[in-house]
Image (cartoon, rainbow, N blue to C red):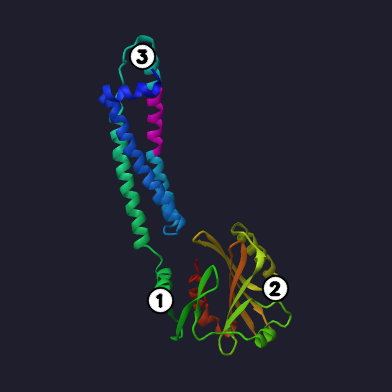
């Protein structure tokens, strides 16, 4: 008799043997639901890293005991199978359903805890500022001015742009960037003192290279800029490198807020900049604009 046939026979002859696999299947299904839910919520940036870690620990609390019990059960079946082949009688099966019932209870509790903290983190503990930029096209500056924005599609990603901003003319681009190599597109206010510049060219850039790229920018700008700040975050599997700094222009200082990311293997840059005099009012608005980025 083959081992697979022996197991089928045992399931018919021994209730404890059959119940073992019923409990095991239920526990494995609960574990898989937790794994899939955790991976999905993490990949979609719906939960924070600490929630991902907690869920992973809960999964391990279930997985480790069931693996150990299963290894022991397979060993017992192997020994029983050998005895059956030698003596042609069904040996005694050591009932493990008591241990599995405990693991099943632990699994149910762990799944409930995981579900509660995941749902709570998504619906209740979501960053209120992120919720605001997702649900409104307006932001009020610290001087009480209401800035209206609208989403603009740039092929692969979208960004909120102030409705009062217009696309900078070629003539103004030549004045702003006299040394050549201007951005692909610039949205600007009437006076040209506040800009959202976009660089969309064919420079190859992988998602994994963004951090190194921003750190290189940081090293460069630290040589002649002040207040250089760097940050990294991720949205929809896109690594975002963020850098802020102030540079000296001919007659004033310029506040720069830049993000770099990859779209279809190409480098994309968004640079919000304004004169130093406008920084206090527009710094939070620049964050509102930068954080509004969405990927197709």
Q: Could you give the CA–CA distance between mark 2 and mark 3, rounded to whole angstroms?
A: 82 Å
> Is 214 included in the stretch rendered in magenta?
no
Q: Which residue is mark 2?
A: 224
Which image quarter: residue 65? Answer: top left
247 versus 205 height, above or below? below
Q: Position of residue 25 (x, y in %)?
A: 33, 36
**Upstream in the sequence, badge 1 or badge 2?**
1
Residue 250 visible in rendering: no
Q: Quadrant of the N terminus?
A: top left
Dominant SS of magenta comes to: helix
Q: Nearer the viewer, residue 113 or 267?
A: 267
Q: Which residues are magenta?
A: 63-76
Q: Which residue is mark 1?
A: 136
Q: Position of residue 183 (x, y in %)?
A: 65, 76
> What residue sits 37% from the left and 26% below the top?
73
Q: Nearer the viewer, residue 195 or 91?
A: 91
Question: Helix or strand or loop: what does disc 1 sit on?
Answer: loop
């Amino acid at each position: 008799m083959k081992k697979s046939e022996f197991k089928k026979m045992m399931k018919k002859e021994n209730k404890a043997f059959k119940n073992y696999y019923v409990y095991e299947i239920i526990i494995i299904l609960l574990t898989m639901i937790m794994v899939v839910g955790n991976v999905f919520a993490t990949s979609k940036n719906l939960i924070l890293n600490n929630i991902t870690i907690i869920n992973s620990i809960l999964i391990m609390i279930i997985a480790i005991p069931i693996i150990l019990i299963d290894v022991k059960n397979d060993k017992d079946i192997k020994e029983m199978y050998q005895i059956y082949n030698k003596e042609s009688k069904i040996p005694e099966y050591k009932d493990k359903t008591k241990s599995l019932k405990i693991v099943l209870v632990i699994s149910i509790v762990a799944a409930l805890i995981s579900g509660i903290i995941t749902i709570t983190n998504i619906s209740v503990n979501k960053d209120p500022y992120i919720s605001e930029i997702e649900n409104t096209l307006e932001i009020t500056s610290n001087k009480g001015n209401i800035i209206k924005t609208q989403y603009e599609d740039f092929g692969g990603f979208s960004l909120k742009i102030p409705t009062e901003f217009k696309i900078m003319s070629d003539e103004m681009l030549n004045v702003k960037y006299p040394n050549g190599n201007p951005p692909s597109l610039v949205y600007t206010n009437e006076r040209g003192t506040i800009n959202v510049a976009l660089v969309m060219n064919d420079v190859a850039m992988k998602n994994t290279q963004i951090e190194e790229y921003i750190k290189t920018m940081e090293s460069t700008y630290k040589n002649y800029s002040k207040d250089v700040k760097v940050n990294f975050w991720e949205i929809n599997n896109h690594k975002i490198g963020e850098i802020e700094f102030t540079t000296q222009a001919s007659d004033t200082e310029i506040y720069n807020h830049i993000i770099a990311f990859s779209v279809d293997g190409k480098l994309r840059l968004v640079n919000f900049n304004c004169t130093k005099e406008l920084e206090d009012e527009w710094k939070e608005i620049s964050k509102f604009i930068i954080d509004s980025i969405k990927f197709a």
